[in-house]
Amino acid sequence: MQTVTVARTIAAPAEAVREAILDVEPFMRAAGFDEVTVDGDEIHLVNRVGIATIELGLERVDDPTAVLAYEQREGIFESMRTEYHLEDAGVEGTRVEASTDFALDVALVGDLLDSTIIRRQRRKELDAQFDHLEATLG
């Protein structure tokens, strides 16, 4: 299992950050995915990484500790789960931490992608989502 974690303090109250994250479609689009479709608790993503096109079918899951959590239901990973957590950062605002745990399905991925590329890409996506929060709430 591989993990990618990114954290940033957003200069906004927790409730505003929570609302921006729970506006799921624009929040997911901010990651730079090529296609995003949200239908209730289902999220469909398409992303082109290098010469590969990755399609993921995700489902939001209940997690009382996370503002947003989702797991892969269809896609290239053996398993994949992402969680977003909020913490009060006092006068500085709200600390947001996003963590993605994943295991690659080697039979599907093969030589096109490896965990290093996936980790680098995921960090870039999470940073872009945090940039979106700063731009939206700042």
Image (cartoon, rainbow, N blue to C red):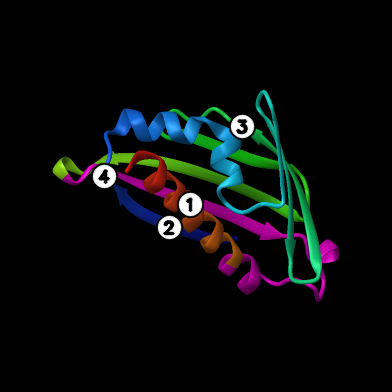
**Mark 3 sits on what residue?**
60
Which residues, given as a range, are shown in magenta?
92-120
Q: Do the residues labelled 2 and 1 touch (CB within 8 Å)?
A: yes
Gap between marks 2 and 1, in whole Å? 7 Å
Q: Dividing the image into 4 quarters, which one contains the C terminus?
A: top left
Which badge, 4 or 2, is on the more N-terminal residue? 2
On whether residue 26 falls in the magenta region, the answer is: no
* Amino acid on which the number 4 mark rests in the picture: Ala
How far separated are the C-alphas under marks 1 and 3? 15 Å
Q: Find the distance from the CA under tag 4 to the CA under tag 3.
A: 26 Å
Q: Residue 117 in the image: state x and y as whole percent.
A: 64, 71
Task: Identify the residue at horizontal 37%, vertical 55% (top origin).
Answer: 7
Q: Nearer the viewer, mark 4 or mark 3?
A: 4
Quarter of the image for residue 66 reads: top left
Mark with earlier residue (4, 3): 4
Question: What residue did someone put label 1 on?
Answer: 99
Q: Mark 2 points at which residue?
A: 6
- Name the residue rendered at 37%, 47% in the picture: 134
The type of residue carrying mark 1 is Ser
Q: Marks 4 and 1: which is nearer the front?
A: 4
